[in-house]
Image: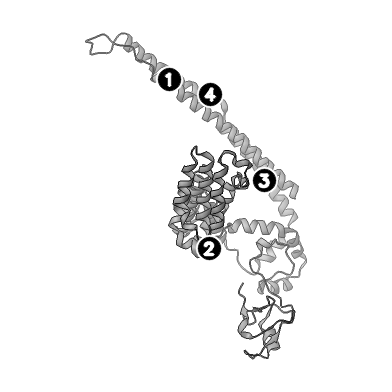
Amino acid sequence: MQEEGYKVLKKQRLCVSRIDSQLSCILDGIRQSKERLQLALHRPEASSSPGETTVTGPAAEDSAERKHEAKHIVLDFMEHTESLHLEQNVANELKSFHIVLSKFGKQIDKQLKNEIAAKISQSKDFDHSLVTKMVAEYLYQNGQIEAADAFCLEAKVDLPAAFRDCFEDLQNNLKSLAQRDLDPAIRWAQSRRRDLCTIRSDIEFELIQLKYLDLLEKCTDVMDAIKFANAELSLFHDTHMREIGRLMSCALYKKDLQNSPYKELFQPERWMEVRESMVLACCNVERVPYRPYLQTCLAAGTRALPAMKKLASVPDNTFTGWIADKQFPVEFPLRDEHRFHSVFSCPVSKEESTPENPPVLLKCGHVICRSCVKRISFNVPSEKFKCPTCPMDQTLFEISELIF
């Protein structure tokens, strides 16, 4: 099934490539026709006879010739466009891709028995509104603002206005970064300075650092970069003194930055790193997910598919009991990035933590459950007790509850 999935992706890329090629031909034709029209309409006019109020003679002939030439150019463009059969070709490409995609869907249905979906959904009705909300959020988070607006309108999805504004601002900043324009992103970071300090984000420093390095690479006078650094980096002297020292030392190697001791600061990857930091900072400030929920569900669900096939063999009564406890009777192999609700198992009692019996961090750094702490300390706050893992002595005043 994985190979069939790769075939679908390959077909999709091929269709997109062919459609882009067709559209490029149309755009080239538009550009060429526009240039021809500009040449025809801006050609020097023939002068008319002195004292004539009505345009006659050479001037009138020239005007008529211009109109005829412009009409001929437009007709040529229309004929060229019709010869490309763009609409039919695009329809054929989409049809061929739909055929491959539908075959893949049928293969998935065949591989994953319907009993699995029936078992999962038997205890709770399927929430279509939740799915449409995830799709809308995915579109916004991927920068497809207009498509997301249209989807929300048609599907009647009501998302907070702040959610849309957050990703619209983010996409505008990312577009500027792609064009090597850092000013919009820096202005955004400066306007959110207090919030960024609260979440301990260094994005403002990273953006100013990148602008300094970019200026140092491009400027002819090194003093331009130094003046910028003195004006913008002074705010970060207390928190980034070491980094600022390295940045100022780069100016000594202005003539050969790529062979300097600081050449790693001038690698092209620095733009992509700042882009990722920008996305993370924006999402943290606005308290929205860094990755779309839909993307996470698809990534985790794809890895869980082989294990889900085992669900078909679980008896209905057993399965219903597991679902009632918000668990599955089989283990799903998820990556660490997809484990959001970790469960702590005490190394002493071998029991899972609960709100009534949470994990506790000891002075030595080891973690056990609260019931074990009470048992080995006899629940006397001032009495010292030893860690069950190491011999360090401590009291109940020196431990802290872990929340995760």
The residue singled out by tag 3 in the image is 101
Of callouts 4 and 1, the N-terminal one = 1
Instruction: Give residue 32's position: percent from left, percent from top.
Output: 49, 24
Report the amino acid beneath label 1.
Leu
Q: How is the image coloured?
A: one colour
Of callouts 2 and 3, the N-terminal one = 3
Instruction: Give residue 404's position: percent from left, percent from top.
Output: 62, 72
Foreground: disc 2 or disc 3: 2
* Residue 5 circle label: none
From the viewer's perspective, tell me whether residue 301 is left or right of residue 188.
Answer: right
Crowd around label 2: few <14 · some 14–19 · many ≥20 (10 Å): few
Q: CA distance from mark 2 to mark 3?
A: 45 Å
Report the amino acid beneath label 3.
Leu
The residue singled out by tag 4 in the image is 80
Foreground: disc 1 or disc 2: 2
Of callouts 3 and 4, the N-terminal one = 4
Q: CA distance from mark 1 to mark 2?
A: 58 Å
Q: CA distance from mark 4 to mark 1?
A: 20 Å
Crowd around label 4: few <14 · some 14–19 · many ≥20 (10 Å): some
- Circles 1 and 2 in contact, beta carbons < 8 Å: no
Indicate the quadrant where residue 43 lies.
Answer: top left
The residue singled out by tag 2 in the image is 200
